[in-house]
Amino acid sequence: MTQPLNVIVAGGGIGGLAAAYVLARAGHQVAVLEQAHAFGEIGAGIQLGPNIFKMFEYLGLAEAVNRVAFFPKGLGMNDVRTGERVIRVPLGDTALAAYGYPYGVIYRVDMHDVFLDACKALPNVTLRTSAKVESFEQDAAGVRVQLAGGESLQGDALIGADGLWSRVREAVVGDGKPRVSGHIAYRAVLKREEVPAHLWSDDVLLWGGEKTHLVHYPLRRGELFNLVAVFHSSKYDEGWNTFGDTAELNERFAQALQQVKELLGKIETWKMWVLCDREPVKNWTDRRVTLLGDAAHPMLQYLAQGAGQAIEDAVVLGEALRYTQGNVEDAFQKYQQVRYLRTGRVQLTARFYGDIYHAAGVQRELRNQLFQGGQEAAGFAGLKWMYEGIDPKNLFH
Ligand SMILES: Cc1cc2nc3c(=O)[nH]c(=O)nc-3n(C[C@H](O)[C@H](O)[C@H](O)COP(=O)(O)OP(=O)(O)OC[C@H]3O[C@@H](n4cnc5c(N)ncnc54)[C@H](O)[C@@H]3O)c2cc1C
């Protein structure tokens, strides 16, 4: 490396911390500015495809992740009304053989902690809470970031990892508010002992119905059980982390099998998310300022890739800075050039998968027919481009 840079990261979610870790590991000085009073994540699960485990290995974090992850046996979809199996793709050794890396699931808090601990172990990362980025300005010499409260910080570069409602994006891309999809997610986590044996599954299991689905899987080595119920609703405009309305949920799942209703009934309080995304863009960089994760390419959760794509972003950003020997503007251009099409493809494909999960009428019958009868390998193969991931050593020539 030539000169270590002073990099400011707005946002201390999974994406921001991943970027901080990658850049600090390469010798740069990194300041993470998080608006919340503490670093943390909400209690819910995330799925991690083989492409993300590839990144963990590259980052030297595989062992830390493996200690807290759960490795499901399969990825399945059942019809929520009839219980009929639509598809089941075996994971475990099959995923390993196909991609060289496993498919896992993890408690978000645990995932966030892996990156937080990794950052804390590096002396050149400064982690600041109650530090809300309000605005920034830049010139040929650097970037000046203004915090709420009046303080300002000077750096060589700014990475906006400030999520779906990104302030930094507003200034760089300026494409208004995120697109409200009309889909709502209710999330809850149960302890293992709260789930009756006949309702437990070691698979990531999705129950698809008309404009609804429920997905569940174990977390934290099997000590917890994650549930996400998704349905179409025009009731809410936007929101994040508020409480759900159990009556509305029950109404949406009125057609579901008794077994599914029984599982839903185990939850007293649901946390609610209004699901949003954006149209993909080709440019999310302005000279010394770029975006990463949801700030750059927010996506619906139907492919379970948002956090994973943020981690891939961080790796590519690190490689771009290395390749350009710390030339920030050049590196940021190269980074987005490598990332925009892949992340755009995930954004658009995720919408399509939402339609498949929530199919009704003839579409539903057709889906069930297409997936059945030995098409299981094809179900997974359709996402080969995504699960194969990126090759960090061969990004730039
Ligand atoms: C229902 C649901 C299920 C999902 N399932 C999966 C899954 O299975 N697999 C997967 O990979 N992904 C999944 N995702 C997507 C994943 O949660 C996101 O893509 C990921 O959290 C994005 O990380 P991020 O760091 O970019 O943004 P965020 O996690 O939103 O973090 C942004 C951070 O920036 C901070 N911030 C915001 N504004 C400012 C500011 N002005 N100044 C300072 N700090 C600021 C915020 O407080 C926050 O800490 C799911 C999402 C949802 C909603």
Image (tube, rainbow, N blue to C red):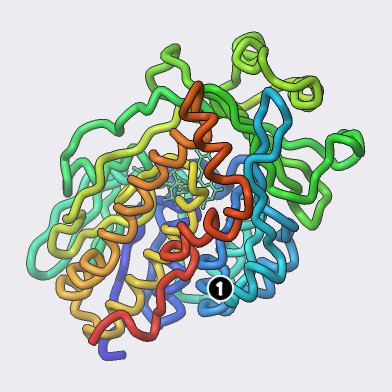
Q: Is residue 42 above or below residue 271?
A: below
Q: Quadrant of the N terminus?
A: bottom left
Rendered location of residue 341, percent (x, y): 26, 59
Rendered location of residue 64, percent (x, y): 68, 70
Left/right placement of residue 36 relative to residue 172 reads: right
Left/right placement of residue 93 relative to residue 368 reads: right
Rendered location of residue 223, percent (x, y): 83, 49
Query: Can you identify the residue that label 1 sits on?
Result: 99
Q: Is residue 258 above or below residue 159?
A: above
- In the rendered picture of this protein, how many numbered marks are placed on residues? 1
For image coordinates 44% across by 31% down, the residue present is 275
Look at label 1 and name its amino acid.
Answer: Tyr
Rendered location of residue 350, percent (x, y): 41, 44
For image coordinates 71% across by 71% down, the residue present is 93
For image coordinates 58% across by 58% down, the residue present is 48
**Foreground of the two, 268 or 375:** 375
**Foreground of the two, 189 or 89:** 89
Left/right placement of residue 120 relative to residue 80 reads: left
**Foreground of the two, 380 or 19:** 380
For image coordinates 44% across by 69% down, the residue present is 389
**Foreground of the two, 243 or 193:** 193
Mark 1 falls on what kind of element? helix
Q: Quadrant of the C terminus?
A: bottom left
Is residue 293 something that shows in the picture?
yes
Q: Farthest residue to the left: give it.
A: 140
